[in-house]
DNA sequence: TATGAATGAGAATTCATTCAT
DNA sequence: TATGAATGAATTCTCATTCAT
C-alpha cells in the first residue's frame, strides 16, 4: 500500500494553502505564480497539482476557508456577549484592530481581489451570494436580538439596516486597506460607533 | 501639409479610450489585452502606441479623466443646491441611480481594480492619495457649510465624519457593484439617509 | 513646375545624412531608429523615404561618402609630403589624434559595425573588397615609392607588407575605440612607428 | 525522485549553447532570434528560459566560456615551449590556422560583435577590460621572459609593446574574418613574424 | 514633395499546466 | 506520489515602411 496517510496529505495541503495565502497577500492573486507558491512551500511544481487542480482552486479554497474560520471565530466570541449591543461592539472592535496588523490589511486586499475576480465569472456568482448571505444573516440576527431585547428601536427595518451595516463595514475596511496615511482611524471609528448607535437605538 | 487636424487626433484618442474603457469594464484591466482594445477600436496594433505609451497609461488616463469629470459634474449640480443638506442629498442620489445603469456598475469594478492595482505600486500611491484627498475635501466642505448654517450639529467632528461618509459611500458602491440579487437597494438607501441625518443633525 | 531645386534636395539629403551619422555614432546602426534620425533632422518620417529607399541605404551612403572624403583628405595632405617616410608618418599621425577626439572614436565603432553588417550580406561583399582594395593600393603606392627612393629596403614584399600595415592600423584603431582606460596610447604609438621603421628600412 | 541527473542538465545546457553559438555565428547576435536558437536546438521556446534568463545571458556565457577555454588551451601549449620566442611563435601560429577554419572565422565576427555590443553598455565595460587585461598580461609575461633570457632586447618597453602586439593580432584577425579573397595570408604572416622579431630582438 | 498616422509582422519573455521518469 | 523539465500559447511593445491627404 504505497498510499501515504490521509493525515500526511492533509498536512501538505494545509502547508500549500499557507504558502499560497502568504504569496497572494503579498503580491496579489494575478501576480502570484505557481512557482512563487511552490518555492515558498518547499514543494515541487508538479506536486501542487496532486492537491489542487488549478491555481484558481487554491484561491477559492483559501477564500472559503478563511470565511468559515471567520464565522467560527465570531461565534466563539459571541458566547461572551450578553446582548446585541455588545455583539455589535465586538464586530466593530475587529475593524479597530486592522490598522495595526499589516498581515490582515494585506489580506483584506486579497478579499477585494476575489470579489472582483468572482464578479467577472458567472460560475462564481453563487459563491459570492452565499458569503454575502452568511454575513447578512449574522447582522440580521443581532439586529433582531436587539429589537427583541429592547436595545434597538422597534421600528428598525432589519433587512435594510443589516445590508447598510455590512456596506459600512466593507467601506471602512476598504479605506483602511488602501489609505495608509493621514487617516484619522481612531476618531473615525468612534464616530462610526456613535452614528450606528444613534441610528439603531433612536 | 496634410497632417491630420488636432480634432481628428483628439477624436481618435477618445475613441481608443472608449474602446479601452469598454474592454476594461467587461473583462477587467489585467484580463484585457492590447489586442482586445485595438480589435474593438478597429485599429491596428501599432496605432495605439502613437497615442499612449503603454497599457498602463491608458488605464491611468481613463481613471484620471473619469475622476475629473465626476468632480466637474458634481460642482455643476451643486450650484442648484441651496444648502449643505441638499448637497448631501444630491450625492446620495447619485448612488441611487447606480443599480439601474449596468455600465456604471461595471465601471465601478474597474475603479476598485485600480485601487488594488495602485496599492501594489508605490509610484501610484500619490495618485490614490490625491484622489482620496479630493473627495475628502468635498465632503468636509459640505459638512463645514452645514455646521456654519446650523443645519448640522455644532460639535460634529468634520474630519472624522467626512472619512466616515466616504467609507460608507464606497462600501455601498462596492456592494451595489458586486451583489446584484435580492438586495433591498431602495430601502437601504432610505435607511442610509435616515442614519446620516440622525448623525449629522442630532 | 512644383519641383524644388536640385540644390535644395541636395541640401536636405546632406542634412539627413548628418543626422543619421550623428545617431549611428551615438547609438549604433541597429539601435538607431528612423524616428531618431528624422527627429534629429527635424524632418517628417515620410520625407526621408523621398531621399533614401531604406535605412540600409542611408548607412551605406554614409560609409561610402566617409571613405571617399577620407581619401580626398589623405591625398591633399600627401602633396606636402616630400617622401614615402613622411607619408607614412602622416598616416600614423592620424591614429595619434584619435584618442582625444570622442566623435571620431564613436565613428570608428560604426565602421566596425558596418564591416560586421556587410560580412553577413553577400551583396555587400563587393563594397568591402573595394574599400579594402583602395586602402591596400594607397599603402602599396607608398611602399613602392619608398623602395624606389631607397628609403625602404629593396627586398620588401610590398603586397604582404601593405596588408600587414593595414591590419596593424585597424587593430590599433579597434583598441583605441574599445579600450578607454589604462591604455598607454602615446608610448604604444611611438613604439609602433619604431617597429614599422625597423621593419621597412632594415 | 526521478528528477533528471545533473549530467543531463549540463548536457542540455551545452547543447543550447552550441545551438546559440551556431546561430550567432551565422546570423550575428542581434539578428539571431530565440526562435532560431530553439528551432536549432529542437527544444520548445519556453525551455531555454529554464537554463538562461535572457538572450544576453546566453551571449555572455558563450563569450566567457570561449575566452576561458582559449586561455586554458594556450597555457597547455606553453608547457611545450622552451622560451619566449617559441611561445610567441605559437601565438602567431594560431592566427595562421584561422583562414582554413570557417567556423573559427565566423566566430571571430561574433567576438567583434560582442565588443561593439559591450562598448555601448556601461555595465559590460568591466567585462571588456577584464578580458583585455588577461590578454595583456599574457603578452607581458612572454615579453618579460624574453627580456630576462636575453632573447629580446633589454630596452624593450614591455607595456607599450604588449598593447601593440595585441592590436596587431586583433587587426590581423579582423582582416582575416572580413576579407576572404585575394589576401596573401601566408606571406603576410611570415612578414608579421619577421617584423615582430626585428622589433623585439633588435 | 511633405506629413505623420497607420500598419502588422515580429521580438523577447512569462507561466499555468503536463508528463516522462 | 514526487519531481522539475518541457511545452507553447499568450502578452506587450517595437519599428521599418507605406500611404492617404
Image (cartoon, coloured by chain):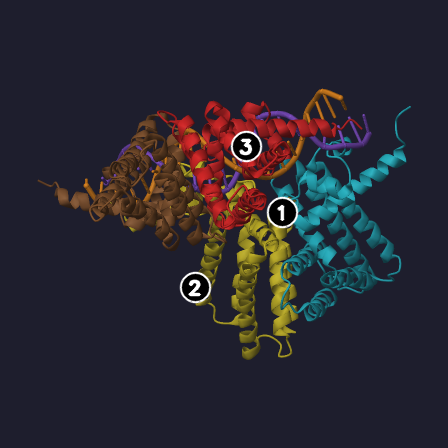
Chain colours: A brown, B red, C cyan, D yellow, E purple, F orange
Q: Could you tell me if residue D135 is visible in this image?
A: yes
Q: Which quadrant of the view contains residue B149?
A: top right
In percent of the image, x 42 and y 26: which residue is there? B186
Residue C39 screen position, x and y as percent = 73, 41
In this rendering, would A187 be left or right of C102? left
Q: Which quadrant of the view contains residue C101?
A: bottom right
Q: Write down the residue under mark 1.
A: D178
In this rendering, would A41 be left or right of C200? left
In percent of the image, x 62 and y 45: which residue is there? C116
Per the model, the C-alpha gap separating discs 3 and 1 is: 79 Å
Residue A1, placed above or below residue B156: above
Label 3 environment density (alpha carbons within 10 Å; few <14, some 14–19, many ≥20): some
| Nearest to viewer (mark 3 / mark 1) | 3
Q: Which mark is residue B90?
A: 3
Residue B176 screen position, x and y as percent = 42, 30
Instruction: Give the mark nearest the N terminus, 2 or 1.
Output: 2
Answer yes or no: do the residues labelled 3 and 2 have beta carbons within 8 Å? no
Which one is in front, C178 or B128? Answer: B128
Q: Which mark is residue D76?
A: 2
Q: Secondary structure at mark 1?
A: helix
Answer yes or no: do the residues labelled 3 and 1 have beta carbons within 8 Å? no
Amino acid at each position: 500500500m504505497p498510499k501515504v496517510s490521509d493525515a500526511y496529505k492533509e498536512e501538505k495541503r494545509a502547508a500549500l494553502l499557507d504558502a499560497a495565502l502568504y504569496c497572494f497577500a503579498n503580491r496579489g492573486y494575478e501576480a502570484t505564480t505557481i512557482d512563487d507558491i511552490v518555492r515558498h512551500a518547499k514543494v515541487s511544481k508538479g506536486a501542487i497539482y496532486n492537491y489542487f487542480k488549478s491555481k484558481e482552486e487554491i484561491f477559492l479554497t483559501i477564500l472559503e476557508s478563511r470565511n468559515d474560520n471567520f464565522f467560527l471565530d465570531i461565534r466563539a466570541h459571541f458566547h461572551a456577549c450578553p446582548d446585541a449591543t455588545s455583539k455589535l461592539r465586538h464586530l466593530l472592535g475587529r475593524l479597530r484592530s486592522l490598522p495595526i496588523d499589516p498581515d490582515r490589511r494585506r489580506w483584506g486586499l486579497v478579499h477585494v481581489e476575489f470579489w472582483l475576480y468572482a464578479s467577472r465569472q458567472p460560475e462564481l456568482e453563487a459563491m459570492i451570494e452565499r458569503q454575502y448571505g452568511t454575513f447578512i444573516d449574522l447582522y440580521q440576527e443581532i439586529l433582531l436580538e436587539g429589537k427583541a431585547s429592547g436595545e434597538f428601536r422597534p421600528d428598525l427595518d432589519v433587512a435594510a439596516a443589516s445590508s447598510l451595516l455590512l456596506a459600512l463595514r466593507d467601506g471602512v475596511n476598504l479605506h483602511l486597506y488602501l489609505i495608509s496615511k493621514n487617516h484619522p482611524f481612531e476618531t473615525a471609528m468612534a464616530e462610526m460607533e456613535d452614528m450606528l448607535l444613534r441610528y439603531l437605538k433612536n
